[in-house]
Image: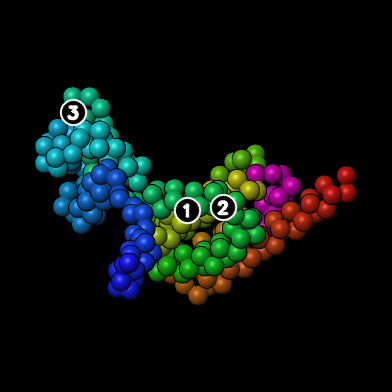
Amino acid sequence: MPDALSVETDSLRSTTRLSPMQVPKASDVLANELRERILRGDFVEGTPLPPERELVAQTQMSRTTVREALRILEVQGLVQIRTGRTGGAFVQRPGQDSIASTVNLLIRGRNVRLAALLETREAVEPACARLAAKYRTAADLEALDAANVAIAAEGSLADFLKANIDWHVAVAVASHNELLTGFMVALSRAIYASTDNQGFVDAPVRKTTVSAHESVTRAIRDGDPEAAVRRMSRHVQEYAEAVLAVEERTAIDVSDE
């Protein structure tokens, strides 16, 4: 008969098990390594990474693995793949478009409500206006003026909304804060898509918007951060109230049918 120690040992062996291990794909490992080196500045922006065959030789990985890693970096906006005799994987650093793309995917993927978009705008845009009043350049003021001219013109709803986006993005650009600018690009696009309806933007809303934009622009031009914050806050709050009021009326009309 087995002794007590043998029985206890067999019992421990039967209950002690290893969990399944998640082993990363070779392409992910290579992409992570290249990504870190790009972000660290080891590869200069605009220059090509080593050719495919050289990466295969250096890493001892298959050509398929190398190509998959490069595709991962391309999707992440860290390299641009060019074909032809002078082609290759050229390094590019993340910019505001990368931020905007990521935020836009989140907004669309999570089906973020219009009310949430407007609330976020109320939190972010006054900060953009404050910084714009501090750091705006002559070129920034020209962009704001051009957007103001476009938004005041008698045009279609699409023209108005485009000029509206241009102005709000111009304020963010004038802040000279890359994160805020990228975030505002995505936010403005999402709000544009949600308000592309004549019912949201009627004549009174257009008139109020033109006046508010001119007022905020004056504060930015005068280098008055407090006035810029106060006027932008009032503008985005009033715009949100007008849009949500129309949305509520539309919902009621639909439910009554």
**SS class, disc 2:** loop
* Residue occupying the far front of the picture: 1
Q: Which mark is residue 103?
A: 1
Give whichever of discs 2 and 1 has the lower sequence position. 1
Instruction: Give me the residue at 25% from left, 44% from top.
Output: 26
Q: How is the image coloured?
A: rainbow
Q: In screen coordinates, is 93 left or right of 96?
A: left
User: Alpha-carbon distance for marks 1 and 3?
Assistant: 33 Å
Measured as percent of width and height from the top left, residue 252 is found at 83, 53
Nearer the viewer's eye, disc 2 or disc 3?
Answer: 2
Give whichever of discs 1 and 3 has the lower sequence position. 3
Q: Residues within 10 Å of mark 2 (few under 14, many from 20)?
A: few
Q: Is residue 220 visible?
A: no
Q: Quadrant of the C terminus?
A: top right
* Residue occupying the far right of the picture: 256
Nearer the viewer's eye, disc 2 or disc 1?
Answer: 2
- The answer to whether the residue labelled 2 contacts the one labelled 3, judged by CB atoms less than 8 Å apart, is no
- Mark 3 residue type: Thr
Q: Which mark is residue 110?
A: 2
- The answer to whether the residue labelled 2 contacts the one labelled 1, judged by CB atoms less than 8 Å apart, is no
Instruction: Give me the residue at 32% from left, 42% from top.
Output: 72
Q: Residues within 10 Å of mark 1 (few under 14, many from 20)?
A: some
User: Alpha-carbon distance for marks 2 and 3?
Assistant: 41 Å
- Mark 1 residue type: Val
Q: Which mark is residue 86?
A: 3
Q: Which residues are magenta?
A: 196-209
Give whichever of discs 2 and 3 has the lower sequence position. 3
- The answer to whether the residue labelled 1 contacts the one labelled 3, judged by CB atoms less than 8 Å apart, is no
Instruction: Give me the residue at 71% from left, 58% from top.
Output: 244
